[in-house]
Image: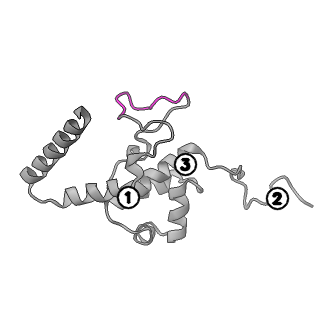
Amino acid sequence: MQTATRGRRGGGRPKLGKPNPIDVHVGSRVRLRRTLLGMSQEKLGEAIGLTFQQVQKYERGANRIGASRLFDLSRVLDVPVSFFFDDMQSQDGQAADPAPTPMPEAGEPDPMAKRETLELVRAYYRITDPSVRKRIFELTKAVANASETV
């Protein structure tokens, strides 16, 4: 006898084709932090008892991350659980954060998802002298401001 749960193991949510946008956002934040730390999917998986394929599915949003796993991820990635929900859009399209960072224009890729951005941030934090790091930061802002006025 076949049941309505055919094709699903042990119940759970049915696969509807597209991942839930919240799961995609949380997964992208996992990927962002893991990449900023220079950690491979394999190393992250080992730290929380998963295979790198399972980490990939989490990062794509294909698999939903449960509360206990999210807690484990926050511990291993050294961020509060709230980090995974930062910059998330609410149902009405507004940023959930009362003081949101500017979002990219429609159709424009999110600069925080680019490998170039992640590598730049990682290199920046490898600068050990805080005064040099601050001067690099100020220089970067000055160059960006100057390019806007040209």
- Residue 25 spot, x, y in % from top left: 49, 46
In the displayed structure image, the side of residue 105 where residue 54 appears, left or right: right
Closer to us: 81 or 104: 104
**Eyeballing the image, is 54 above or below 61?**
below
Q: In the rendered structure, does residue 97 fall within the stretch colored magenta?
A: yes
Disc 2: CA contacts within 10 A as few (<14), some (14-19) or many (>=20): few
4 part of magenta stretch? no
In the rendering, at what x and y percent does residue 98 appear? 37, 27
Crowding near pointer 1: few (<14 within 10 Å), some, many (20+)? few
Q: Read off the residue under disc 2.
A: 6
Viewport quadrant of the N terminus: bottom right
Q: Are marks 1 and 3 in contact (CB under 8 Å)?
A: no
**SS type, badge 1:** helix
Question: In which quadrant of the rendered image does the C terminus lie?
Answer: top left
Cα gap from disc 2 to disc 1, whole angstroms: 40 Å
Whether tag 2 and tag 1 are in contact, CB under 8 A, the answer is no
Q: Secondary structure at mark 2?
A: loop
Q: What residue appears at the point 71 percent right and 49 percent down from the top-left corner? A: 16
Given residues 66 and 125, the one toward you in this image is 125
Which amino acid does the dot numbered 3 rest on?
Asp
Q: Residue at point 54% right, 69% down?
A: 53
Q: Quadrant of residue 141?
A: top left
The residue pinned by badge 3 equals 23
Of 147 and 81, the residue lying toward us = 147
Q: Which residue is mark 1?
A: 115
The x, y position of residue 140, in whole percent, is 19, 46
Q: Quadrant of residue 116?
A: bottom left
The region drawn magenta spans 92-101
Residue 77 seen:
no
